[in-house]
Image: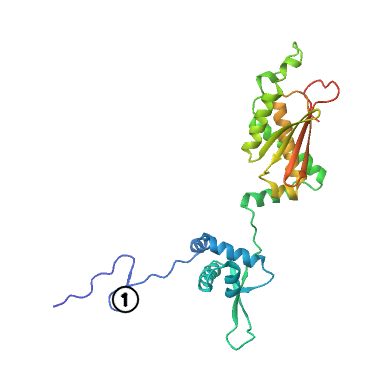
Amino acid sequence: MTGGPGPAAPGRRPGPSGGGQRVAAASGPAADRGRRHGALAVASRLDLLRLLRAAPGPLDARQLAQESGLAVSTVRFHLDRLAAAGLVVTGSRPRSTPGRPRVTYTPTSPGDDRDGYEQLAAALAANLADSAAEKAARAEQAGRAWAEERFPTRSPDATTNVAEPPVPELRALGDIMRQVMALFTEMGFDPELADESGGQRILLHACPFIGVARAHPEVVCTLHLGLLRGALEHLAAPPLDTRLVPFAEPGLCVAHLTTPAGPAPGRSRA
């Protein structure tokens, strides 16, 4: 005599014939997050999403296949994943010939190719203060505070001693500039030091904040000027007049460091 069906396996419900019943696909906020991240984890889908965001209107799968070089079937597969993740929505476009309307796709948001940090920096720079002058003042103060964090203790040569003349307190500019160049290199710049009449200049190539700097030079570039001035002060540099020219050339900012024309007691910076 044959025995009846045994107990269902854990996690499966007994079906009409005693077998297990497939569990429904996961749903809920966690599953939605997984679908969104999964949809954006494939380079081809990101390319299709960029094409849709750059287009003046909705596109169908054949148009996207022509633009991307992918097969139409592959494009449809990726678009289904993007739609399931809520990154695109579908519509319809009547055909000029008999047949069903074509399915079109539209992005749900214009998107932003900037990373999260750059978007955050841009939002903060735009709302730092009401006027450009106040933004610049706060930005320079922030730069000096940044230098304070990078150089929490002043150089031993910077200790003030009223019994000694000020000249021995100052360090050789060459040593200081090596530290300044290292500082900007660590930040992501490709700095270049060059001599000029009356002093030196730092050519700040490859600004890692160039997107925000173009939109808000009074904040980003002035902050870097404050950082430079603060670093020179904390490193006990000789008296220098410092200024920074944003975008002196396309993609290049230039910091000028010149020796003051007349006697300049102390270590004040212009």
In x, y percent, where is residue 73? 51, 73
Q: Which residue does the image show at 81% across and 20% down from the upper left?
A: 265
**Furthest-left residue in this view:** 1
Res. 124 visible in picture:
no
Residue type of the residue flagged with mark 1: Gly
Q: At 72% from the left edge and 46% from the top edge, which residue is drawn?
A: 251
**Relative height, residue 241 to residue 207 (above, below):** above
Q: Locate residue 99, reporting x and y percent.
A: 58, 87
**Above or below, 240 relative to 130:** above
Q: Position of residue 223 (x, y in %)?
A: 73, 39
* SS at badge 1: loop
- Image quarter of the C terminus: top right
Asked which quadrant contains residue 109, the reply is bottom right
Is 164 drawn above or below residue 208 in the view shown?
above
Near mark 1 (Cα within 10 A), the count class, few <14, some 14-19 or many ≥20, is few
Place residue 239 in its image quadrant. Answer: top right
